[in-house]
Image (tube, coloured by chain):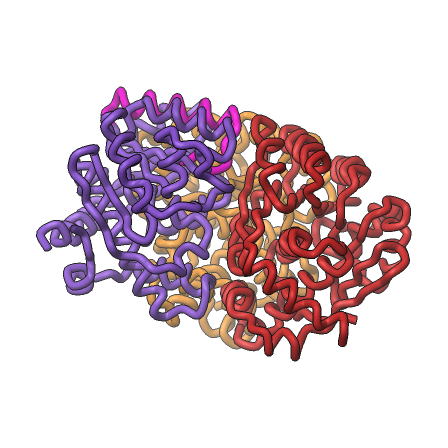
Chain colours: A orange, B purple, C red
Amino acid sequence: MELSAGVWESLKAVRERSPLVHNITNYVVMNNTANALLAVGASPAMVHAREEVADFAVLSQALVVNIGTLSPDWVEGMRLAVHAARQARVPWVLDPVGAGATRYRTTTSAELARQAPAVIRGNASEVLAMAGEAGATRGVDSTRSSDASLEAARGLASRLGTVVAVTGKTDYVTDGSRVVAVDNGHPLMARVTGMGCTASALVGAFLAVEPDAVLAAARALAVLGLAGELAAEQSKGPGSLQLHLLDALYTLDEATVRARARVR
Amino acid sequence: MELSAGVWESLKAVRERSPLVHNITNYVVMNNTANALLAVGASPAMVHAREEVADFAVLSQALVVNIGTLSPDWVEGMRLAVHAARQARVPWVLDPVGAGATRYRTTTSAELARQAPAVIRGNASEVLAMAGEAGATRGVDSTRSSDASLEAARGLASRLGTVVAVTGKTDYVTDGSRVVAVDNGHPLMARVTGMGCTASALVGAFLAVEPDAVLAAARALAVLGLAGELAAEQSKGPGSLQLHLLDALYTLDEATVRARARVR
Amino acid sequence: MELSAGVWESLKAVRERSPLVHNITNYVVMNNTANALLAVGASPAMVHAREEVADFAVLSQALVVNIGTLSPDWVEGMRLAVHAARQARVPWVLDPVGAGATRYRTTTSAELARQAPAVIRGNASEVLAMAGEAGATRGVDSTRSSDASLEAARGLASRLGTVVAVTGKTDYVTDGSRVVAVDNGHPLMARVTGMGCTASALVGAFLAVEPDAVLAAARALAVLGLAGELAAEQSKGPGSLQLHLLDALYTLDEATVRARARVR
């Protein structure tokens, strides 16, 4: 109850302050991510080149780094942006898309994870892979439940001194000791590409207004999950879900958030 | 009748087995392609860097290579992925977007086409260009009918020992001797970008469950065309078509497929 | 009244002639941009590699260069495409996304702006930055009204001998002496990413059929703004706006355009 109450406060703060969220993300989801950030009230920008990432990161209120379609030039941009963000105390989120699927993803994720992200947001397979459990990932979709990875998430968070958010049927957010669970969401969301990437981006927006990274992540996930539930109620399939989700992020009101956000 | 009957079997198999489809495709359509693959029941991944394409290709049940927004680094990734897929006997699809429009596209398409794709899927202009007929392409949209390119498609398929699928008002799939025609589809589909790219991606998903490449391609095209027809019935324009198409791919049921798939 | 009358003539010409519009644009908006061009009746292509941009630019009826997600390879592609377009007298549009936000964007915009674009289309912050006013840009969304930048736009247009279109609540198009204002549009449009990029792309399509760049730009902006108004009337949020906007671009008819286009 108390935990759920904060969801509205943070959503309201995002809408009022419209934080600038710097994204270095993958080609597949850039459009959706930008639209979800705009719908929730933030100001997104996608900037990846080494020539300008550092300049941009320090203008921003949060940085989101997503390795979904990585390549060496982009990874170099990620490194520089993260370095600049850390210097300027801009919180940053790591989305280790497909960690475990290829060595390149696993090693890049591991390297970035050591650069003090405020939050690492992944699915169960990715979190298990980052925690060192082999064979957990197939492609970029999870093959494991979030429950199965909770202990791995706690261990990873403790080891790195960060917050880990594992999304799935239930989302878990942990700093290694505290564990907050979010029960919002709908299975149809998994049929829209980049929903996890959107989650990571919203975590960035909420970090810009809420310094407690466990709360920021949980609230962002509750907002996305709730918007997904509202959208699913009106949708025949993943095409309509995507549309209604953006509308729901934009129209979510206090009464609905207070009644239906499920953070515990 | 008999040919149409197989469409449902293959769609059902895609939904049940959820094949991992590795895509190296263009920036414009990545999101749509991923969403169409998810909607039809497959598991998409977009992976292009030379550092990991080979690792990823061999994890996959099909590879789809689309040159829509090519550049040297990406072409190198395509080569490595194709090489790995061939070694691992993973079937792969070539989409020669804009072949004939520039020399770079024509030569890249020709080079890749010699690497034993299971299927080459293009519009009439692209297939004519690949068959050596000059002046057929203007930009990336076809200026020629699929009928006009059928003989070129047969010749190309025979010469390369592959299957060629030409999409248009009627779609034709041929291995040089057999010719299968698909009559599903709707003109409004041409007003949504990347519909051909989606067709190629679905061909990849169907190849993962149906080893006869002529049948796999024809069934994939029938499913997409039928979903497009159902979507067009509810759409005022290309914006709504795109949404309803994803919903239709997701909700297509046996009765509808059996009644309306038109493969001959 | 007289100015508004031309909007329909140009839209009709775009639909009839279906100009090939070559875009070098950012990853975030490629899909939307292509779909908007298709919906309005043009034929879009996204081609960026130095290996082919020059070949492609000269096939096209207009070129649109947008620096939204720039990097050195892409900037080189832009230079080559612009050079080829100028040689072939193909009109081109510059969209200086985020000019002023980082030095890289500001200098790249300035360099390209000296290559005789037919139209520069930006938001107020970008136009102020290009006119040399510091501190105007925050991220990629404007912090200033279009009214505030009108004088800067006139000065910039005069200095460069080009047409500058500043979009905002009211859009202004100027060649330094003439100023045409467009009052179409809806605030919800700002909640969909890449709406400005779509505006620039439509300006390209209209330049292909209307040699007077002031009129071409104003008419394109009127069409987009009007489509946005019609879309907003049916939309609950930015998700549905995006869909209805494409439908409206596709279905806009003469009566509606004549009654509601507001160019003065």
Q: In the shown orientation, is residue C145 left or right of residue B100?
A: right
Label tally? 0
Quarter of the rendering occupied by the N terminus of chain C: bottom right
Residue B72 magenta: yes
Q: Looking at the picture, tell me which residue is in the foreground, B18 or B73.
A: B73
Residue B214 magenta: no
Q: Quadrant of residue C160?
A: top right
Q: Looking at the picture, tell me which residue is in the foreground, B127 or C50.
A: B127
Residue A99 appears anywhere in the view: no
Q: Looking at the picture, tell me which residue is in the foreground, C259 or B63.
A: C259
Q: In the shown orientation, is residue A33 left or right of residue A21?
A: left
Q: Is residue B216 above or below residue C140?
A: above
Quarter of the rendering occupied by the C terminus of chain C: bottom right
Where is residue C239 shown, x and y percent of the image? 51, 64
Where is residue A128 shown, x and y percent of the image? 37, 37
Range of the magenta residues? B66-89
